[in-house]
Image (cartoon, rainbow, N blue to C red):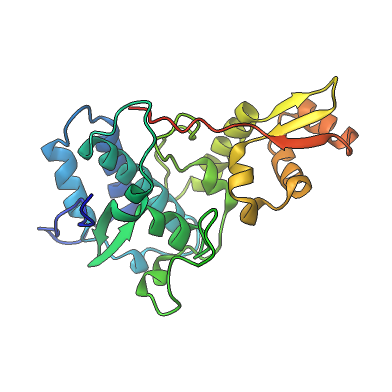
Amino acid sequence: MNPAALNDPPDAAPPDDAVALSASLLAAMRALDVTVTPEAAALARALGGVRPGAIPPEGGARVAFWVNVYNALMRHAVVALDLPAGSRVPLGVFSRASYLLGGQRFSLNTIEHGVLRRNRPAPFALRRPLRDDDPRLGAMPATFDPRVHFALNCAAASCPPIRAYSADGVDRELDLATRGYVEQETTLDRPRERVRLPALCWLYSRDFGARREALRWVSAYLPDDDRRWVEAHPKARVSFNGYRWGVVR
């Protein structure tokens, strides 16, 4: 795959509302079937006019913007590369599929690990994705919110559902997304006193901690009855559910 960005340089003035544009772009990309439509391509070009550093870092606007952009870019890549359903996304896609924003290239990896995770190494990686002097660090949200893991969709069957996030409602929206995903992907085997957590908690142990720490984090988002059972069984065995990597078209 060519590392060139999937959007051309913008041919219009920067948008007034970057988060609204990201939501529109996501809606257009979600509607794609086998080809990228002129409407979707035009929205991607308009995205190039956004200067991410101008989006307020506090209050959730940057988080909402980047989650929408990541999910739109992932869908754009799946369609543009014609990735077969059921296949696994080639790892190179995450570093090469990118959008130009404000003259800087943001790949899927850059958005997730460099920006949203505030420059933390990717799973199984040792190095941070961005150097200390990289100007793209100026696009990071003020704080890292682990709930973004339950909003980002990498096109795999076990990924969280895709939805648009808003600047004003992102806290509530992330909470709903986290609760829904945690409830679906956490398994309680009460007779055997075992808990299987979402595989994302294992992949991102840097963010959720070791097994007991991850269990404490996840239990806060479980339904009340399940949360009370976890609290009443502090010695329950903790493991992780599997992850289905096949592409969903």
In what quadrant of the picture does the C terminus appear? top left
**Could you tell whether 22 is left or right of 145 in the image?**
left
**How many labels sit on residues?**
0
Figure check: 31 above or below 121: above
Figure check: 86 above or below 65: above
Towards the viewer: 57 or 240: 240
State the image coordinates of residue 230 (x, y, percent, origin top left): 82, 33
**Residue drawn 80% across and 29% down?**
194
Where residue 103 sits, quadrant-wise, is: bottom left
**Residue drawn 53% across and 45% down?**
149
Q: Residue furthest top?
A: 191
**Residue drawn 46% across and 33% down?**
245
| Residue 24 appears in the picture as rendered | no
| Residue 186 appears in the picture as rendered | yes
State the image coordinates of residue 63 (x, y, percent, origin top left): 46, 54
**Residue drawn 36% across and 50% down?**
94
**Could you tell whether 96 is left or right of 186 in the image?**
left
Towards the viewer: 37 or 5: 5
Towards the viewer: 175 or 133: 133
Figure check: 88 above or below 44: above
Towards the viewer: 12 or 93: 93
Q: Residue furthest bottom?
A: 133
State the image coordinates of residue 200 (x, y, percent, origin top left): 58, 42
State the image coordinates of residue 126 (x, y, percent, origin top left): 54, 64
